[in-house]
Image (spheres, rainbow, N blue to C red):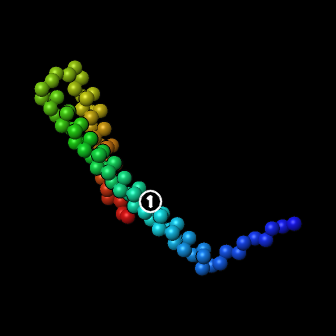
Amino acid sequence: MKKPTKIIKKSNYFPYLCRVKRNYNKTGEVKREAQREVAKWCMDVAKYITTVILVTSFLGEFRQKWLVYIIGLVLVTILFYYGIQTLNKKQ
């Protein structure tokens, strides 16, 4: 014999949907804020790499300076591009 199913009234179901939607919005805001912090961190790391390359090029001697410059330029470009793109995303 089947058990009778519980009938969900529309008035009881609606607040549940609102609560789920509200939590989703908070989660999205937290995710956006975390992405912005990572983007800021990437831009800071790009600046640090640039500073290190400039200082060591003046003070140190390298056998293959071009390799250091190319690797540094690639890293700085990737990190800075990611940071700018993430910070400029429309909400």
Quickly name the residue at label 1.
27
Task: Determine the residue positioned at 80% across, 68% down.
Answer: 3
Where, quadrant-wise, is the C terminus in this rendering?
Answer: bottom left
Task: Determine the residue positioned at 84% across, 67% down.
Answer: 2
Instruction: Please provide percent x and percent y for residue 19.
Output: 51, 69
Camera sees residue 56: yes
**Could you say which is closer to the camera, residue 41 or residue 63?**
41
Task: Determine the residue positioned at 22% across, 39% down.
Answer: 48
**Amino acid type for the residue under numbered disc 1:** Thr
**Could you say which is closer to the camera, residue 65 or residue 14?**
14
Camera sees residue 80: no
Instruction: Please provide percent x and percent y for residue 50.
Output: 21, 38
Q: Is residue 51 left or right of residue 71?
A: left
In which quadrant of the rendered view does residue 13 lie?
Answer: bottom right
SS assignment at label 1 = helix
Instruction: Please provide percent x and percent y for residue 1.
Output: 87, 66
* Residue at the far left in the pictured view: 58
**Could you say which is closer to the camera, residue 39 or residue 57?**
39
**Could you say which is closer to the camera, residue 64 or residue 9?**
9
Instruction: Please provide percent x and percent y for residue 15.
Output: 54, 74
